[in-house]
Image: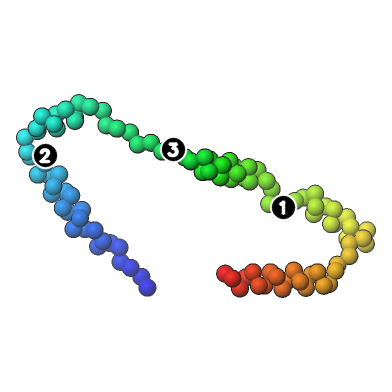
Amino acid sequence: MAIDIKQVNTATNTQIGKSTTNKSSEKPSENAVTSLSTPPKSDSVSLTSQAQQLQNIQAKMTDIPEVNEQKVQEIKLAIAEGRYKIDPEKLATNIAQFENDLKDF
């Protein structure tokens, strides 16, 4: 189902434009003059310690390669030398577990 967002909040935008026009045509009050002379406040963000920990973990994870090349080389060598044995029961269990995990999505 598609939603047309082109017409959303057009009345609000029009009202905002009108209200700012009306304010600008009024005489500036004493409060308006003082607010113009004071610098605007700046926004600030502070991260919790938990957010900082997550940020550090994420940075460390980007350094970890997706593929363990050493493990790949060990398996290739074991296959080439005939030492790599496949346990059919373990393989079947892992495939069944993988399929069950996919059902959850």
70 sits to left or right of 6: right
Q: Secondary structure at mark 1?
A: loop
Q: Secondary structure at mark 2?
A: helix
Amino acid beneath label 1: Val
- First in sequence: mark 3 or mark 2? 2
Res. 67 mark: 1
Quarter of image, res 84 = bottom right
Amino acid beneath label 2: Ser
Callout 2: 10 Å neighbours few (<14), some, many (20+)?
A: few
Closer to the camera, 22 or 54?
54
Q: Nearer the viewer, mark 3 or mark 2?
A: 3
What separation in Å lies between label 3 and label 1 (alpha carbons)? 35 Å
Callout 3: 10 Å neighbours few (<14), some, many (20+)?
A: few
Amino acid beneath label 3: Ser
Q: Are marks 3 and 1 in contact (CB under 8 Å)?
A: no
What separation in Å lies between label 1 and label 2 (alpha carbons)? 62 Å
- First in sequence: mark 3 or mark 1? 3
Residue 35 visible at all: yes
Residue matched to label 3: 46
Closer to the camera, 80 or 43?
43
Callout 1: 10 Å neighbours few (<14), some, many (20+)?
A: few
Q: Are marks 3 and 2 in contact (CB under 8 Å)?
A: no
93 sits to left or right of 43: right
97 sits to left or right of 52: right
Res. 59 mark: none
Residue matched to label 2: 24
Q: Secondary structure at mark 3?
A: loop
Please report the residue visible at 16 percent of the width from the left and 48 percent of the height from the top: 17
Q: Nearer the viewer, mark 3 or mark 1?
A: 3
Residue 55 visible at all: no
Q: Are marks 1 and 2 in contact (CB under 8 Å)?
A: no
